[in-house]
Amino acid sequence: MKDFFSYTSDLFDPSRIKDKPEILKGLRVIDFTHVIFGPTASRILGNYGAEVIKLELPFYGDLWRPATYWGRYWKHSNPIWHFITQNKYFVSIDLKLPEAKDLVYRMAKDADIVLENFAPGTAEAWGVGYTSISKINPNIIYLSCSTYGQYGPMRYFPGWDLLAQAASGVLSLNGFPGTDRYYKLPDYLGDFFPGNLGAMVLLLALYYRNKTGKGQYVDLSQTESMMRILYHFTYHSITGEALGRTGHADPAMVAASIFKTRDGRFIGIACGTEKQFEGLCDAMNKKELLQDRRFSDYFHALQEKNAEELRTIVGEWVKVTDCDDIVRLANEKGFAAAEVMDDKMLCEDPWRRERGSVILFNDEMYGELAIAGPTSQLSKTPARTKWLARPVGYHNRYVLKKFLGLSEEELDELQRKKVIGTFDDKPGLKPPLYYDLEKDPLYNYGREVAK
Amino acid sequence: MSLFRKKEKEKVYTRYSGMADVHAWRGVVEKLSTPEGRPDVLDDILVIDASYANFSGIVAASLFAEFGAEVIKIEPPEGDPCRKMTPYGRNVKGVGIPFIFEGRNKRYMTLDLQNKPEDRETFAKLAKKAAVVIETFPAGDMDSWGIGYRQLSETNPGLIYIAITPYGQYTKKAEEFRTFPDSDITTQTGSGLAAQIGDLPTEPEPYNWPLRAGMWMGWYITGLGAALGGAAALMYRQKEGEGQMIDVAGMDAYACLTGIPVSIGYTWDKPRPRIGVLDFILYPYGHWKCKDGMVAIVASRDQDFRALLKIVGRWDLEDDYKFTADRISDIIDQAMALHRAIEKKTMKKGADELTMKALKYAVKAAQSKWRGGGVPIVMRVMTPEMARNQKQWEIRKSFMEVTDETLGKFTISTGFVKMTESPPKVKWVTCDIGKDNDYVAEKYLS
């Protein structure tokens, strides 16, 4: 039999991903979502091959388009927007106009999934909510994303990732005990995590529909999603105490904390088993700790006072040891240790490049950009990036002509009435300056273009 | 309690209200709020969770179990080491709190895969009937024991085999770090999360160090990644009858979930600093001290920011922060000056008062074209214990009080998504080691 690692490197070979089948090929998704939470759920469907039609307001676009880190654009676009809206069809229609609603209803007839994350009640008020769409297409799967959910006294509260973090308790947990120093989870994690959960739920709803023929309505709240991951509620109900903030330390694992090394780098260390603790003691040349009553078994070593003393011992050792040596020892002796990776280290990490967790994607409009791969690699039907974000309304002609069969005259009429439109001359909304849209066959779908 | 109470009028804080079809909508909400007894989407599949000392496997298995899969957790007679991972060693009869929390609808069977060849044979028999196997052993170990994806898929071509490790199943590094143990904190540091939490570089040590997110964020992202990949593979299995292998690397967790570190690392060509309570894109978007705790405030769009200045009584600042760019944190001193100016004002008021003021403003703004639709939002920063007691979650059944013969009474958070047809449910929480040995033997092995 072949050696295991040559078997797996064949199985997962990143260069063959594009030839493998897409699970959701032919699936049509109408995507009313904006900012990050909803778009992440639909993006993942797009990664698996679904046709995601992202609807935006003409000339204005998604609120998040211009929202870039420290206001820095990359080729007149928002660099993080490319990850969030890859593989999507960008159609811009003005939902306030009856003609636009008519287009949506026509699209909904043979759509499989609809997503929205307006403030609760808005989609219903606009006549594009579940009650309206399910009349046209009873087997539709409809996902509404919101901060507090679609019913309950807080449902009309406006929301953001940060508010979900505040309302669920996660915001209060990242920081130092006995101080006011605490911080939100970074990078809108309160959107990305629930967004991924939403994609999973949609896949299961599809699975259910394939079995029973029934669609359904899904109400996903980002606050509830974040509460789902806190064992703190159980801790409180059992011990009568609040777990609260614990600084750099993980109170649930032996010797687990973030430490500063001799060479001024930062490293996370933990022992998940008694055997791993032996490995750590061995690495520190402190085998005598194994005889120490304080650390005699896993539960003992976790007790508040013992754990603190153990972290001091480990911290002293890390302080006089280089980061690379600790990682090497961890691998040799068998305990967990990983350096704190920053943006640049992650982006340039050869392991991630080889694995396909960081992809140097070459886009027809934007050229090369590093894009993150999926959180799990599938051997037969992998997720993939096919194209990056596009300007507002870029796929108007393509989608409306090809999918809805509109004629040139109808398109002209819609354009004239401003039911559909493209982009204002603003970064985040428009194509890169050097890019000649007149020569783009997709943008001009159904029209002759100069070569 | 009825969800639509008598004459109490609901407050609407946005421009749009009114329903296309109130009657139909009420029917939908009735269904959403009564998950009990509704179908289980995964009631036709068997999931075997053989994860060991890696909580992300348990998380993935829980998600399948909540959606109705039959999940059998396999562990050696002394139990999965995850049973012992618990804050300060607090446990109930030897079971740690995180393990109790994730013990949802699962069967427990003892098999010593690491040491006993005959147990491996039993496992292989069981895996013939499974749709999903989850394991977290060093890459290649299961294969060398004759129960890896290669061998199991020969007799069960529909098998979805999810392997979770820090560095994955392929690449040179995966081989070199094959036996590297997994943990939440190393997932947080190694996948880019810790680098973005912590105070400004100018603050004293250790506050300016990279910081751990105060929950098992690394393991939950990894577990969700595994379940999401598994759900996708289930779709393919349903259509084509074929399974596949899924490789989840813990060190991908944060970087691949948000994608932001990767694209920023590439376009900026340098790492971001840690910026404490500020935000890189939005401002104001953070939390401030108030008279009775802390409030989170989002007032990031220009109209929201101006509304906030009105609410806290600092309209005089409008001139200094005229442009959106004036508020962005790339000039940290300027952003911090604004932060402190707002804090001086919020300190004088209570969280509820500030929340109500903001809501009132938003309601008025929604009706007036002169206020530009500003929706400043204020929310009390709650501890999990405070969140637990909110009416919203009581009505939405987001928590469950459960009672177990062995473990006693405790609370878990459930119902993270509401669905009209096939919602997730928690039916039992018992997690005694080997409690279902006989059940499994009879149902699947005879």
Image (cartoon, coloured by chain):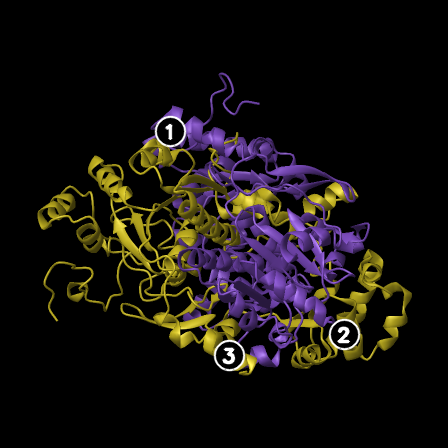
Which residue is painted at 43% across and 46% down in the image?
A: A211
- On screen, residue A419 versus residue B173, left or right, reads left
- SS state under label 2: helix
Say which of marks 2 and 1 sits in front: 2
User: In 3D space, how far apart are the residues under numbered discs 2 and 1 (Cα atoms)?
Assistant: 60 Å
Q: Residue at x 60, y 45 (%)?
A: A227
* Residue behind mark 1: B17
Residue A280 image label: 2
Q: Chain of mark 3?
A: A
Name the kind of residue labelled 1 in the image. Ser
Disc 3 secondary structure class? helix
Q: Are marks 3 and 2 in contact (CB under 8 Å)?
A: no
- From the image, state whether disc 3 or disc 1 is nearer to you: 3
Give x and y (percent) for residue B353: 57, 31
Chain rendered purple: B
Mark 2 touching mark 1, by CB under 8 A?
no
Asked if residue B5 is positioned above or below residue B373 in the image, the reply reads above
- Tell me the SS state at disc 1: loop
Q: Colour of chain A?
A: yellow
Residue A257: percent from the left, percent from the top? 71, 64
Which image quarter: residue A145?
top left
Say whether disc 3 or disc 2 marks the residue closer to the N-terminus.
Answer: 3
Label for residue B281?
none
Determine the chain carrying the residue at label 1.
B
Crowd tier of the residue under label 2, counting other residues whose Cα lies within 10 Å: few below 14, some 14–19, many 20 or above = many
Alpha-carbon neighbours of circle 3 within 10 Å: few (<14), some, or many (≥20)? some
Is residue B439 at least partly visible in the picture? Answer: yes
- Which chain is disc 2 placed on? A
Which image quarter is the N terminus of chain B in? top right
Query: Disc 3 designates what residue?
Result: A7
Residue B436 located left or right of residue B270: right
